Image (tube, grey):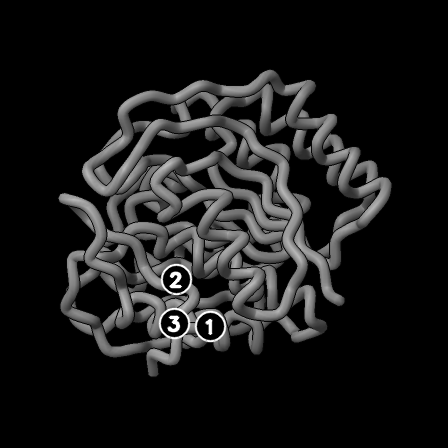
Amino acid sequence: MPTALTIAGSDSGGGAGIQADLKTFSALGVYGTTAITAITAQNTVGVHRVLELPADLVAAQIEAVLSDIGADAVKTGMLSSGEIIEAVARKLAEHRVKNLVVDTVMKAKDGTTLLPPQAIRALKAKLFPLALVVTPNVPETEVLVGRAMISVSDLQDAAREIVAMGAKTVVIKGGHRPGAAADLFYDGKEFHTFTAPRVDTPHTHGTGCTFAAAIAAHLARGEDVLSAVAQAKEFVTEAIRHGLALGHGQGPVNQLYRNTGQR
């Protein structure tokens, strides 16, 4: 059975983070393992409290998994600090992880900061050179390159810069732009655009986590990068379409729509 490791924060509401990743892995036929970087007290309304775990404990979780079970792909999400990023990068380099998907989680849906500004330098310097795929949204892309993203040309220039930072490929997610949900893919040579109709729903919690985890799952199953991204785009679009109206705020996407007979 293919295996995938997620290195991310825990969402007590089950909508994003570790919980979303594991649901995605399971839905796509991949055995999921975890290394938790932080514990959050959150629900559909917002993030109420965050406890960052020690970097050496994060490293120990990664070592325990990779030295025994291994991982056909690894996905990172909320990494919380520069120290954790360095510990993660060191362990992934030690184990020569090849199929690494880096979801550049910086803020929660409610605006809570999940990655301090000083840690972004470590993300770019330590983790991007190990990454097969990096998946920033438009606001995260603006932080990474230090300027506003207005046009498609701006996005293309930013994609080139992110690949120049060491990432082999980048997918800039277009959910924050008007119109259809168009994601820009760049592998250092060619651009591809993956477009899907925008789903009119407020229940989109966990979208970014689910997309990156789906890419990792398809990589773990042996797909090439372009195919993995294309299939992940289809999967997350349907997960959004079948989003769940749970709680009193922004409900989660539904990674298990196939398993509950919803089409």
Q: Where 226 falls versus 113 (above or below)?
A: below
The answer to whether 153 is drawn above or below residue 12 in the figure is below
Residue 191: image tag: 1
For the C terminus, the quadrant is bottom left
Q: Is mark 1 on a helix, strand or loop?
A: strand
Tag shown at residue 73: none
**Total residue callouts:** 3
Distance between the Cα atoms at labels 3 and 1?
31 Å
**Callout 3 environment at 10 Å: few (<14), some (14 to 19), or many (20+)?**
some
Residue at 49 percent across and 27 percent down: it is 38
Quadrant where the N terminus is found in the figure: bottom right
Q: In x, y percent, where is residue 215?
A: 55, 64
Q: What residue type is labelled 2?
A: Gln
Q: Is mark 2 on a helix, strand or loop?
A: helix
Amino acid type at image mark 1: Phe
| Residue occupying image coordinates x 39% and y 24% | 117
Q: Are marks 1 and 2 in contact (CB under 8 Å)?
A: yes
* Relative vertical location of residue 239 with respect to residue 83 in this rendering, above or below: below
Identify which residue is drawn at 70% across, 27% down: 59
Give the residue pinned by disc 3. 257
- Residue closer to the observer: 73 or 169: 73
Residue sitting at x 40%, y 57%: 157
Looking at marks 3 and 1 on the same chain, the residue that comes earlier in the sequence is marked by 1
Dot 1 or dot 2, earlier in sequence = 2
**Residue bearing the label numbered 2:** 156
